[in-house]
Amino acid sequence: MTFTTRVKEEITTIEVDKISSLIELSAFIRYTGQIKKHKITLTMENAQVARRIYKDIKYNFGININIIIRNQKRFRVKQIYILEIAEKIEFLLESLNILKKGRKILPEEYFLDSEEEKKAFLRGAFLACGSINDPGTGGYHLEFTSSEEKDGTFIATILKEYKIKAKVLKRNNHYMIYIKSAEQISDLIKIFGATNSLFYFEDIRIYRDHKNMVNRLNNCEIANQEKILKTGLKQLEDIQYVKEHDLIGLLDENVQEAIKYREAYPETSLQELADIISTETGRQIGKSGINHYFIKVKNLVQKHKENQEGN
């Protein structure tokens, strides 16, 4: 079972009142219905969604519905459920705020004037044309599809009221309304009322966030270690130059002591080197003090090289 199927089937188990039932049905027919003058055709791949829509139509309008079940053989055999409505077409579409005086309209303000009604509309739209990636197997992605740009933009407008930012993109002959933010997808699943799916999504999200954090920390640790080794190697090169050119006597005792400890502990950081010197000599020194000593060594090497080039 895909995660999309899981969410949709959970939505179909949510008990709703008559008004929410009408609005779910309105969104479903708007986004997936093939509307002709004498017939509305609704095609679904999920038996529970088909049962929910059939129940909503019967409950609200009491009209006859022709049910067709077909086997589709594309990669694998699956059943397709088709509901055909051939009576009270205009009355049904006007009651659902899809048509007005024979023309298709966007839902009017009175039709979605409460939070529950807007949530019902989003549930119906998702049942009709929504899909969501399984967070455990892919990236975060939830989308709706619409054949008309204005219908797609309308979904994005409702989502914006919940501070969910959706982008609308034309793809072939359809419009895709999609969300990439894991947090906002989680918020939308919560709006749907699909609690079990929300828990699953959040568990995966927390696991992935933790894993990414650990990876980032490991990368930082590796980068720091590489920096420490690079610094240590450069200091050892300067120390070797000083010794080869008999310059050690130009440095004071504290610097010479730091040189001795750097040679003994070539892979330690400046802070670790300072701690070792402080412990073994009883003379307190910090990271900045050690760094200052090796700056003196570096400056001595540079000055000597400049003099050599000048001569």
Image (spheres, rainbow, N blue to C red):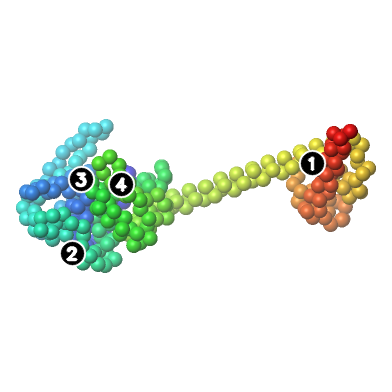
Sooner in the amino-acid sequence: mark 2 or mark 3: 2
Dot 2: within a 10 Å radius of its alpha carbon, few (fewer than 14), some, or many (20 or more) residues? few
Q: CA distance from mark 1 to mark 2?
A: 78 Å
Q: Earlier in the sequence, mark 3 or mark 1?
A: 3
Amino acid on which disc 3 is placed: Met
Residue type marked 2: Lys
Mark identifier at residue 44 = 3
CA gap between label 1 and label 4 equals: 58 Å
Q: Left or right of 309: which side holds 29?
A: left
Residue contact between numbered discs 1 and 4, judged by CB atoms under 8 Å: no
Q: Which residue is disc 2 drawn over?
A: 18
**Is label 1 in contact with label 2 (beta carbons under 8 Å)?**
no
Within-10-Å neighbours for mark 4: few <14, some 14–19, many 20+: many
The residue pinned by badge 1 equals 235
Marks 4 and 3 close (CB-CB < 8 Å): no
Which amino acid is tagged 1?
Gln
Q: Amino acid at mark 4?
A: Met
Is residue 226 in sight in this rendering? yes
Q: Residue at x 36, y 45 (%)?
A: 133
Disc marking residue 176: 4
Location of the N terminus (image quadrant): top left
Residue 67 x/y as whole percent: 11, 46
Rendered residue at 92%/37% (across/down) = 246
